[in-house]
Amino acid sequence: MKKIVLLFAITATLFACKDVDEDEVVTTNYNMTFNFTQNWDGEEITNPDYQTTVYTNANGEELTISKLDYLISNITFTDEDGEKTVIEGYNIMNARDGVNTQYSPSRKIPEGEYTVSFTFGFDDEDNIDGAYPELNSNPWSWGVPEMLGGGYHFMRLEGMFADNTGTQTPYLYHAIRAATVIGENPETEDTSFETELGTVTISQDTTIEIKMNVAEWFKNPNEWDLKELNSNLMMNAEAQRMISANGKSVFSLGTVE
C-alpha cells in the first residue's frame, strides 16, 4: 500500500512540474478608453472659455477660441519587440461641445508595455476623397474642395484676435493636406503626422488621457503671426507645412488609469 501511495505522489509531482507549452499561454486583452482634453499652456480649456477667455499667443497677440474640431486616426500600440497593434479607423472631436472627446474603440489590447502613438488627420493612404460619407455632410462637412486635392480636414481652429489697431479680426487656422498645385489637376503633399505620446503599461481596462496644448499651434518651431496668417491657409502650402511642424509638439500623454 505504501508503494502505491508513493507512486501516486511521484506521478502527481511530475504532472505539476510539467512545462506549459507556449501555445497554451493565455494572454488577457483589455478595453481602452481615450479621453481627449485641451489646455492653453496647462490652463484647462472648457466650454465656458469659448468666445470669452482671452489667450495670448507666443507672438503677443490676444485671441479667443470659438471652434476647435480635430481628427486623429490609427492609434497604435508598439510593444518592446517592435510589434504593432493598430486601432484602425478615426475619431473626430468637437472640443467645444465635448462631442467624441471620449473614444472607446471595440478593439482590445493585450496586456504589456507599449509606446502609444497616433496619426493627426489622415495619412495619404486613408485620406481618400469621398471615402467617409459621414464626414461629408452636417454636422461635420469635413471634406476638402477638389481643387485643393480633395480628402478631408485635419483640424478647424477658429476665433477672433486683436490686430495692430485693436480691431477684432477673425482667424481660420485650418489644417489639411498641403495643396502644392491648385486647380483642375491639383497636386498635394502629405502633411499629416504621427505623434508619439510615451509609454504605458496595460494590465487592466485602461483610460488614457491625450492632452492638446492649443498654445503650441502658435509657438513651436514656427512663431505664428496672426496678422499675416489668419485666413486662406488652406490655399497656402507653406502655411500647411508650418502647421504640421508646429503640431508635433501639441499632444502629450496625460493621466493613465
Image (cartoon, rainbow, N blue to C red):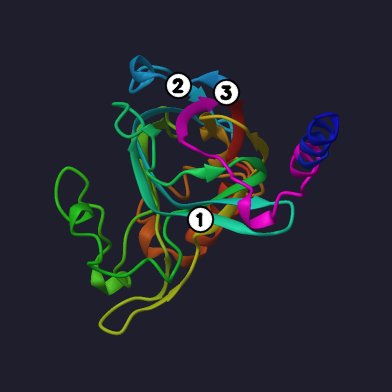
- Residue type at the position of mark 3: Glu
Q: Is residue 46 above or below residue 200?
A: above
Seen from the viewer's position, the closer of residues 256 and 134 is: 256
Magenta highlight range:
12-40
At 56% from the left edge and 29% from the top edge, which residue is drawn?
204
Residue 116 seen: yes
From the top left corner, tell me how far across and down residue 222 is, in percent.
62, 49
- Residue type at the position of mark 2: Ile
Mark 1 = which residue?
86
Q: Nearer the viewer, mark 2 or mark 3?
A: 3
Mark 3 = which residue?
257
Q: Is residue 214 above or below residue 243?
A: above
Mark 1 burial class by Cα count in 10 Å: few <14, some 14-19, many 20+: some
Q: Choose the circle earlier in sequence order: 1 or 3.
A: 1
Quadrant assignment for the N terminus: top right
Is 184 included in the stretch rendered in magenta?
A: no
Circle on res. 35: none
